[in-house]
Image (spheres, rainbow, N blue to C red):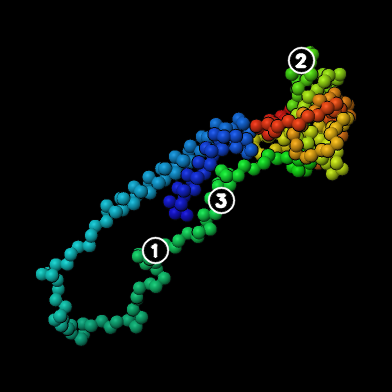
Amino acid sequence: MNRHAQTVVLLLTGGALLHAGSTDLYLRYVKAGLQPLLIGAGVVLIAAAVATLWYERRATRSRQEDGAPAPERNEAHAPDHTAEPDRAPETDRTPAPDHAPGPDRHAPHPDRHAHREPRVAWLLVLPLLALVLVAPPAAGSYTAMRTGSALQEQPWGYPKLPADGPLKLSVADYAGRAVYDKGRALAGRQIKVAGFLALDGHGAPYLVRMALNCCAADAQPVKIGLTGELPPVLQPDSWIEVTGTYTPKRTKDPVNGTAVPYLSVASTRPVKAPQDPYDEAWNG
């Protein structure tokens, strides 16, 4: 692509990053802590586009100023080609070679224009337009049931829980305490956990949150099996808050063999999907 096309692509890319970073759109791609870096990258790309355009215009102006007009022909001193030139003696003539070197037909002509870049290169702009115009959905139940659970390493410890009242925990917090702490701090307590529903191949329900290390491409699910009083109709990818109690029941994730704990459900209620659909990755 030429310089002007490169400038357009850089400008669109930087604008798309700024648009995503200044709205909630970036949460569909990266975790919240990367927002300043995303905005910074957008500013740098826009600055690079402006610098490229300025450099190209300056180079074009410099070429135009350096180009001098062709000198006029001085007729007074021009040689007269009408008169027949003196012939050299026959002995001084050098026979022309049979194959005199001529112009190289394969050499590039100075006036020949460079080939145009293929127009298909402009298809690079389509992903940028899609980034601005279409917000992709967050990874959901389809990805969750085909990816191994992120609950793989035992943490060093857990923060102390309130002494009374219901416990409002994240999916990762409940799963970690149920598996590695054997539910010691959860037994006999009312527990509230929110996430989206996912069903395995046999229709068994799970409460899931996707965890990120960096971006949506490395998202992994943290799963809790559900048992007890469940709604008669379970819709995958719908967000619910379940209220229940700890149960020692557990199973193994069929994808990577990680332990998946269960929660005994007493009641459920639908909730709105959170602004940030992803959790921080389980880091042990």
For image coordinates 23% across by 60% down, the residue present is 69
Image quadrant in which you'd find residue 278: top right
The residue to which callout 2 is attached is 162
Q: Nearer the viewer, residue 136 or 255?
A: 136
What distance separates the C-alpha of mark 1 from that of mark 3? 29 Å
* In this rendering, the label closer to the viewer, 1 or 3: 3
Give neighbour class at mark 1: few <14, some 14-19, many 20+ (Cα, 10 Å).
Answer: few
Q: What residue type is disc 2 on? A: Pro
Give neighbour class at mark 3: few <14, some 14-19, many 20+ (Cα, 10 Å).
Answer: few
Q: Position of residue 204 (x, y in %)?
A: 86, 38
Taking the image as shown, residue 199 lies to the left or right of residue 9, namely: right
Viewport quadrant of the C terminus: top right
Give neighbour class at mark 2: few <14, some 14-19, many 20+ (Cα, 10 Å).
Answer: few
Taking the image as shown, residue 179 lies to the left or right of residue 13, namely: right
* In this rendering, the label closer to the viewer, 2 or 1: 2
Residue 87 in view in this figure = yes
Q: Residue furthest bottom?
A: 90
Q: Nearer the viewer, residue 270 or 4?
A: 270
The residue to which callout 3 is attached is 126
For image coordinates 34% across by 47% down, the residue present is 58
Taking the image as shown, residue 277 lies to the left or right of residue 95, namely: right
Please tell me which of labels 3 and 2 falls first in the chain. Answer: 3
Q: Position of residue 244 (x, y in %)?
A: 84, 25
Residue 37 in view in this figure = no
Name the mark on residue 113.
1
131, above or below 196, in the image: below
Q: What secondary structure is found at the residue carrying circle 1?
A: loop
Q: What residue type is disc 3 on? A: Leu
Q: Position of residue 277 (x, y in %)?
A: 68, 34
Q: Position of residue 121 (x, y in %)?
A: 52, 56
